[in-house]
Image (cartoon, rainbow, N blue to C red):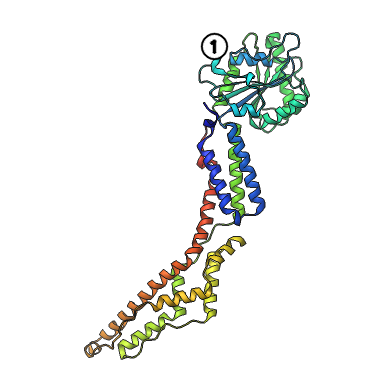
């Protein structure tokens, strides 16, 4: 399986979505938030490149602990260095099941000559049992100096299970505590203590050793770390170790979890940077009423009623004073930008028409409403009880309905740009509110 196949489409798509939001929302985000988001999304990309489907299990321990023999016993291969006089592992060795894990092993500094596929073993785990697992035989912590530190730094962020292989004679070595266990103190489920070479111990000796190791772990605030025992020479406990690795293969990798933690953190910080979601905004019907009052729709309607009753001239739409349009525009701005950050308020402000444009548009919209000929009601109509009032009311309603319809279209047109700005913010916040639980399921 190629490394890129380890990419989960959900993670890749979510990173792309967040990056698009950063690109689109940069004008409204604090510069520091943009910088941090881009940095974190770059970090996510690097993790994705390593392959988030790999579960990394590292065998660590001191010289003589039997790590390499244990590596060979677990994998069913005979590849890790096993010394006779002073057994020492100076370079990492890896065995991968289900994929080559090329990018990951490049990152961890494992040479191509020391990479192996678990499927090549004639004896070992059942086929498919450990798919996704990458087992590492890490250099002896007490045999390498500065070069080992770089390997530790690369390993710790991606390790899913650290197997602390203990020499029954040197299990209390504090250097191992400092380099590995202290760094993983918050992830005790990611560690086990494995007493190796138990074939050299009596039953009582192993029991006493377990108690002493448990005591040391409690002193290091690692009391929840599981303790296992094995012998690479006799095979004792090897199936239990393989079963532990199998359980690791069934859970999300630490790299995948870290990716989602970073993605969710980026989403939260972007949402905080964008500020509150838009409130209800301008009510169209209320806006129509305000504009109708400003241009005198009621006065025109009254003159139509008078013309029907008694004849006369219909009043024309009036020119409202500039202050009236300034006040209406200010109301619109307050409603459209309620609760928004200063940056978003400024964008809404720019998207609204000027007071002059608002007034001209509303006035023109109503003036385009046809008045037609409004004749005085005929004699029979005026003499018939209630007929005159019905005719006058019908004329009023006909004009008012047409004027209001024209103003509704005007309001919708004038508010459309600011509503697009608000929708842009709302859509971004909706996308940012989605979390890992909505987008991803466990492996």
Pick the front one: 50 or 281: 50
Q: Is residue 341 visible?
A: no
In the image, residue 263 sits, relative to residue 103, either above or below, namely below
Dot 1: what SS?
Answer: loop
Q: In screen coordinates, is 9 left or right of 384?
A: right
Residue 326 pos. (x, y %): 54, 76
Q: Quadrant of residue 389?
A: bottom left
Number of labels in the image equals 1
Q: Residue at x 41, y 70 (%)?
A: 408
How many C-alpha atoms fall within 10 Å of the one at disc 1: few (<14), some, or many (≥20)? few
Residue position for label 1: 122
Q: In screen coordinates, is 12 left or right of 370?
A: right
Q: Residue furthest left?
A: 380
Q: Residue at x 41, y 69 (%)?
A: 409
Q: Residue furthest front?
A: 112
Q: Residue at x 24, y 89 (%)?
A: 378
Q: Is residue 82 visible?
A: yes
Residue 181 pos. (x, y %): 71, 28
Residue 97 pos. (x, y %): 55, 22
In the image, residue 171 sits, relative to residue 323, either above or below, namely above
Residue 304 pos. (x, y %): 34, 84
Q: Quadrant of residue 198?
A: top right
């Amino acid at each position: 399986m190629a490394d890129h196949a380890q990419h989960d489409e959900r993670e890749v798509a979510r990173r792309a979505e967040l990056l698009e939001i950063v690109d689109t929302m940069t004008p409204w985000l604090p510069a520091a938030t943009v910088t941090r988001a881009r940095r974190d999304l770059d970090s996510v990309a690097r993790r994705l490149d390593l392959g988030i489907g790999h579960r990394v299990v590292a065998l660590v321990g001191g010289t003589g602990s039997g790590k390499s023999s244990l590596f060979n016993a677990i994998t069913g291969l005979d590849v890790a260095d096993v010394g006779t006089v002073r057994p020492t592992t100076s370079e990492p060795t890896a065995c991968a099941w289900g994929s080559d894990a090329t990018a990951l092993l490049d990152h961890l500094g494992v040479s191509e000559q020391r990479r192996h596929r678990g499927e090549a073993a004639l004896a070992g785990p059942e086929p498919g049992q450990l798919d996704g697992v990458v087992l590492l035989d890490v250099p002896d912590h007490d045999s390498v100096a500065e070069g080992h530190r770089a390997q530790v730094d690369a390993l710790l962020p991606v390790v899913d299970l650290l197997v602390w292989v203990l020499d029954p004679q040197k299990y209390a070595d504090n250097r191992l505590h400092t380099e590995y266990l202290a760094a993983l103190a918050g992830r005790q489920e990611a560690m086990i203590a494995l007493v190796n070479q138990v074939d050299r111990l009596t039953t009582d000796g192993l029991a006493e050793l377990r108690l002493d190791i448990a005591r040391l772990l409690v002193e290091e605030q690692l009391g929840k770390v599981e303790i296992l025992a094995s012998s690479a020479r006799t095979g004792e406990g090897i199936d239990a170790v393989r079963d532990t690795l199998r359980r690791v293969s069934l859970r999300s990798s630490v790299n995948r979890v870290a990716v989602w933690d970073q993605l969710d953190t980026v989403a939260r910080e972007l949402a905080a940077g964008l500020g509150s979601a838009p409130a209800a905004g301008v009510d169209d019907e209320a806006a129509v009423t305000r504009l109708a009052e400003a241009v005198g729709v009621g006065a025109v309607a009254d003159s139509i009623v008078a013309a029907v009753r008694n004849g006369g001239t219909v009043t024309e739409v009036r020119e409202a004073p500039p202050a009236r349009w300034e006040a209406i525009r200010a109301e619109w701005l307050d409603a459209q930008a309620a609760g928004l950050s200063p940056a978003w308020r400024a964008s809404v402000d720019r998207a609204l028409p000027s007071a002059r444009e608002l007034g001209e548009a509303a006035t023109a919209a109503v003036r385009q409403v046809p008045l037609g000929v409004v004749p005085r009601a005929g004699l029979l109509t005026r003499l018939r009880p209630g007929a005159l009032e019905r005719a006058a009311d019908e004329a009023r309603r006909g004009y008012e309905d047409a004027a209001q319809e024209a103003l509704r279209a005007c309001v919708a047109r004038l508010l459309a740009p600011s509503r697009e700005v608000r929708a842009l913010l709302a859509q971004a916040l909706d996308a940012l509110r989605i979390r890992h639980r909505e987008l991803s399921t466990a492996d």
